[in-house]
Amino acid sequence: MAEQSQQGGFAWGKVILLGEHAVVYGHKAIAGAIERGVHCSASPSSSARLLVTAWDIDVQVGDEHPVANALRAILEASEAAPALLEAQSDLPAGAGLGSSAALCVAIARALRPDLQGPGLEALANRGEVFFHENPSGIDVALSSGGGMGVYRKATGLTPIDCPKLPLVVGLSGVPRSTAAMVAGVGQRLRDKPALETHLQAIANQVELGQEALLAGELEPLGALMDQNHASLRELGVSIDALDQMVEAAREAGALGAKLTGAGGGGAMIALAPGRQDEVSEKLQSLGYESFVTNLGAPRTT
Ligand code: PMV
C-alpha cells in the first residue's frame, strides 16, 4: 500500500473532574480531555475492517460485535469508500476514560479528514450509540475538540479556558457498566429520597470547583474533589479498590482525589501538581496500573 494513500486521525480520551451522576439529573459537570487517546489510519481496501491491537479487536462490517456495528454506522454515514482501519490506543478500554468515543472520533477523522466541529461529532456519534444507549455527547465533544468544559444535559458543553491540570489516573482493573451504575443510583434515590441531598452537594461542589478552576486555585479544587468522592460514596458508587487508591494518592501528596466516571470499578483521578510521579508510583506499589497526564489536552478544532 502506497504511503500517500493512507490518511489518519487522532482523538482524545476524557475524564470527569467533578459532577458525575448528578449530571444525569440535570446538574452541571466539569470534564476535560486527557493527553491519551486513539489514532486511526485508513487505507483503501475492498472491504471494511478495523483492527485495534491494544484492545484485541479485529472486526469487519457484518460481524456480530458492537465495534463492527459502530464501524458500519460511521462508514455508511460518512459516504466514504470501504477501508482498512488500523487504530493504536494508549487509552485503557472500558474504564470510563472515553475510549469508545475516542475510537469513533478517530475512525470518523480517518474516513473524513475534511470534517470538523459539529459535522465530525455527528458522524462519530453514529457509532457511539452502539456503546452507550443514550450518549449525552460529552465524550465525543471532548474527544474531538480537546480542552475542558462545563457540561449540562440541557445546554451541552461550554468550553472553559484555564491552564491544564496535572493529574494521575489510577485504574481499579474492575470492569463496570455505566448503565448499571446509573440505574443503581436511580433505584437508591427512589428507595431513599433523602439521598437527594448528596446530588445537591455534588452540584455545589461543581459550582465551587468551576470558580476555583477559573481562579487557578488548585488547593480548594483538590479539597472539592475529596468532598466529591465522599458524596459519590454516599450514593453507593465507590468500591474498596477506588477508596484505597484515593486514600493512597492523598497520602502521597495529591491535593485531592476521587473516582471518575460511573464508579463501581473503572478509574480514579488525583490532582497532584509537582507530585505526579510520587502519586503514580504509590498506586503502582499497591498493584494498580496508573499513569501521569494533564487534564485539558489542547483543543483540536
Ligand atoms: O461512562 P463514564 O464512566 O465516563 O461515566 C458516565 C458519567 C455518569 O454521570 C455516571 C453517567 C452520565 O451519563 O453522565
Image (cartoon, rainbow, N blue to C red):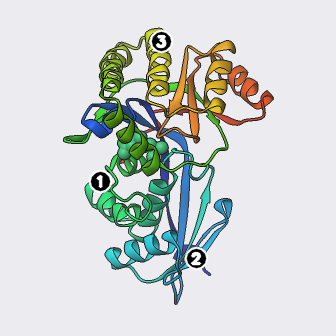
Q: Are marks 2 and 3 in contact (CB under 8 Å)?
A: no
Residue under numbered circle 1 = 117
Q: Amino acid at mark 3?
A: Ala
Measuring 40% from the left and 48% from the top, which residue is drawn there? 139
Q: Residue furthest front?
A: 191
- Secondary structure under tag 1 reads helix
Rendering coords of residue 230 (x, y %):
48, 20
Residue under numbered circle 2 = 59
Rendering coords of residue 42 (x, y %):
52, 72
Q: Which is closer to the viewer, label 1 or label 3?
A: 3
User: Mark 1 vs mark 3: which is more N-terminal?
Assistant: 1
Q: Quadrant of ligand 1?
A: top left
Q: Are marks 1 and 2 in contact (CB under 8 Å)?
A: no
Q: Is residue 146 visible?
A: no
Q: Is residue 225 visible?
A: yes
Q: Nearer the viewer, residue 210 or 214?
A: 210
Residue 138: assigned label = none
Measuring 37% from the left and 30% from the top, which residue is drawn there? 19
Q: Nearer the viewer, residue 214 or 31?
A: 31
Residue 223: assigned label = 3
Q: Amino acid at mark 2?
A: Val
Rendering coords of residue 212 (x, y %):
37, 14
Vertical arrangement, residue 295 with respect to residue 153, above or below: above
Q: Residue furthest bottom?
A: 46
C-alpha span from label 2 to label 3: 44 Å
- Secondary structure under tag 2 reads strand
Measuring 39% from the left and 46% from the top, which residue is drawn there? 183
C-alpha span from label 1 to label 3: 34 Å
